[in-house]
Image: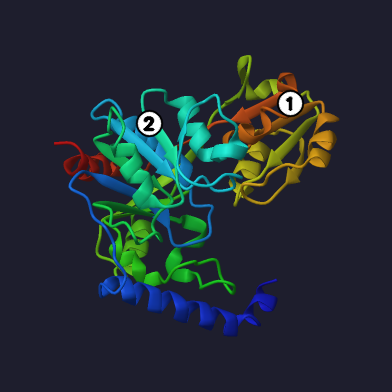
Amino acid sequence: MKHLRKLLFPFSALYYGSMWVRNFCFDKGFFSSKSYDFPVICVGNLSTGGTGKTPMTEYLIRLLKGKTSLGVLSRGYGRKTKGYIKVDKTQDAIAVGDEPLQYATKFDDIQVAVCEDRRLGINKLRSGGFPPEVIVLDDAFQHRRVTPGFSILLTSYSALFYDDFILPVGNLRDLRHQARRADAIVITKSPVTLTIDEQDLIRNKITKYSHSPVYFATIQYSDKAHSLNGPTALAAFKDKEVTLVTGIANPEPLVAYLNKQNLKFTHKRYRDHYNFTAGDIAGLEACSCILTTEKDYMRLQSKLNNEKLFYLPISTSFLGNDNKRFEKQLLDYAVI
């Protein structure tokens, strides 16, 4: 596959050129970008996905929601609707997107909205009766019509942006040097055994593109699967015939975790934000026990028998003292 992708270099050159021109126009002011007089935080990446944006956004929500009134704005990728929609937990993922529905379901003390036009979405959120003091933009690093006050760039340890290539040869949807726009860079999905020397090596390579602080984080999987009936210890699934269903960009870490737990399963893998068809659902109904991700659960819960549908929560955790440094930098910006 890698050799086949190399044949696509001419297309990568065209894509590179178009992205260079676009960024140049924003940098020089030929295209307008709006900034705001209240905290706007962007979470994003340079690649096509799989960097852990959702658990990082949840980390920010948990950090900020008790300290300020908070709004989260997403495009609502994969939804079948257009325009601005205020999200609540009674809605369906097909209408608002899986990630926004997940935020609204888990955090009832924040405001969540979707809008493909980030400027319009911010204006709508702020024009309500209780305007949020801080807005988090989920997956908005490439949306340059808005200039955030604080940008967090995520890059996965297994696919660091400085080793990647522009689409379609690689997985970058923006240019490496755009990392200079980040206020903080987080290396996600890092091994917990990553040494200080290895961290310093990565930091040194990033300095070619950015001198912003670099932090290291990992993904933590729960030891309990959750369902409509509450949590169940993962060990209880060892005697079940489990079907793992994933519609995320990179399910390999989850697969590795379940294998480490000695859980036997059949894996049905779908593309990121996949909208399950009636045929897919009919096939899944025949499974006796389905384990999935929290994002996929948002798209499946209204379509499948919830008695046999479980999801495994994940969360972001920083290595060493990086959480203290990261949180101080963020709170110094967002909370007065």
The reply to whether the C-beta atoms of the residues labelled 2 and 1 are less than 8 Å apart is: no
Closer to the camera in the image, 204 or 299? 299
| Residue at x 63% of width, y 80% of height | 8
| Residue at x 52% of width, y 83% of height | 13
For disc 1, the marked residue is: 238
Q: Position of residue 316 (x, y in %)?
A: 43, 39
228 shown above or below 336: above
Q: Earlier in the sequence, mark 2 or mark 1?
A: 2
For disc 2, the marked residue is: 111
Callout 2: 10 Å neighbours few (<14), some, many (20+)? many
Quadrant for residue 175, please give it: bottom left
Observer-side mark, 2 or 1, equals 2
Residue 248 appearing in the image: yes
Callout 1: 10 Å neighbours few (<14), some, many (20+)? few
Q: Considering the numbered disc 2 on the image, is that residue within a helix, a strand or a loop?
A: strand
Relative horizontal placement of residue 40, taking residue 78 as reference (left or right): left
In the rendered view of the protein, which quadrant contains the N terminus? bottom right
Closer to the camera in the image, 80 or 186? 80
In the image, farthest residue toward the bottom: 10
Q: Amino acid at mark 2?
A: Gln
Quadrant for residue 286, please give it: top right
Relative horizontal placement of residue 115, taking residue 248 as reference (left or right): left
Relative horizontal placement of residue 266, taking residue 295 as reference (left or right): right
In the image, farthest residue toward the left: 336
In the rendered view of the protein, which quadrant contains the C terminus? top left
| Residue at x 52% of width, y 33% of height | 101
Relative horizontal placement of residue 322, taking residue 1 as reference (left or right): left
Q: Position of residue 234 (x, y in %)?
A: 64, 25
Q: Amino acid at mark 1?
A: Lys
Q: Position of residue 224 (x, y in %)?
A: 58, 24
146 shown above or below 7: above
Residue 60 appearing in the image: no
